Amino acid sequence: MTIVFKVSDNIKEKMIEYYRDLKREKTPPYATFQADEAETVITLYESGKVVFQGESADIDANMWKDLEKSVNNRDIDLELNKENNKKDEEKDTRFIGVPTIGSDETGIGDYFGPVVVSATYVGKEHFNLLYDLGVKDSKKINDFKIMKIAPIIMKNIPYVSYILTNKEFNEKPTNMNKIKALLHNKALCSLLKKDNFNYKYIVVDQFCYPKVYFSHLKEVSEKCTNITFTTKAEDKVLSVAAASIISRYILLLEFKKLGDSLNIILKKGASNMVDQQGAMIVKKYGEKKLAEIAKLSFKNTDKIKAILKDQA
């Protein structure tokens, strides 16, 4: 499937920022960049023409079409315009002192390891515990503290977690935002079945335009729809922060489990050091091992193959 349309200079800037870490090293003539997101190839030309190619081309393209419309209508997209909304974010007091349900995921940016999503309920009876533990976004807490406080949180607040293994991730490659939407929805629906929680908001950190989020769920029979989307949710909503910590804790355990099976400490992220480690693993265990421990749709896979080719 191929979809082509033209975007404004405003959207061009947002696309350049959005796909910054997904760009290919080589760029076609007259193109600003070419990037890979799951099985979709995105090419943005200097003229403003953008080409989406792949099975999920329509989903990826629609996100930018919707954003173009919203910008034209002065309805600023929260995901891709975080800096412009910084002052408004700081004034957002909706979630202070009220019970909430929130979800958060981790592992999306790591080549190795699974994707983990968690949903939690935080009522007023949990506030003091979480404040005392210093709960905030897991990215702002070191791994040592995560390992220390996550078990306490998990013991004292209702939560649900799901692990999308590398094998499952690789069996049916798809748009990364679709994966996140499906996992968030699954965790939230499961948590809501646990009890009749007295919450005011269900909050999800906004990683895509709400219309796009729900378009990813069109084939799902069970949906959680009364969601409040907001950026930087992990900084503003205790339930999202708690979910972030639980997800990170589980991911750390999974990383250790995978590393122990290989007798190495697996590197996080998707850097050149990850490529070097991936090449070493393939040399020692064979190419099939990557399918068990890595997200093959990442551009790291091609870089690993290139390293092995150069070393041959």
Image (spheres, grey):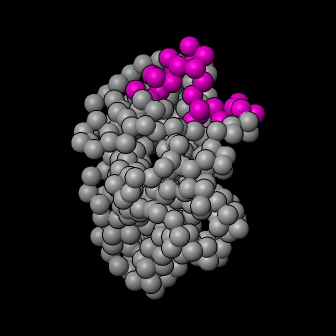
* Nearer to us in this view, 200 or 191: 200
246 lies above or below 147: above
Q: Is residue 82 magenta?
A: yes
**Farthest top residue?**
73
* Nearer to us in this view, 254 or 38: 254
Q: Is residue 206 magenta?
A: no
181 lies above or below 85: below
How many numbered marks does the figure carry? 0
Look at 41% across and 32% down and name the residue there: 212
Image quadrant of residue 309?
Answer: bottom left
Look at 47% across and 26% down and name the residue there: 64
179 lies above or below 68: below
Residue 281 seen by the camera: yes
Quadrant containing the C terminus is: bottom left
300 lies above or below 113: above
- In the rendered image, residue 79, in percent from the top left (x then y), is placed at 57, 36
Look at 41% across and 63% down and name the residue there: 161
- In the rendered image, residue 308, in percent from the top left (x then y), is placed at 42, 67
* Nearer to us in this view, 185 or 279: 185
- In the rendered image, residue 153, in percent from the top left (x then y), is placed at 56, 69
- Start-end of magenta stretch: 62-89
Quadrant containing the N terminus is: top left
Task: Give left or right: position of 71 versus 85.
Answer: left
Residue 86 seen by the camera: no
- In the rendered image, residue 196, in percent from the top left (x then y), is placed at 40, 52
Look at 66% across and 49% down and name the residue there: 97
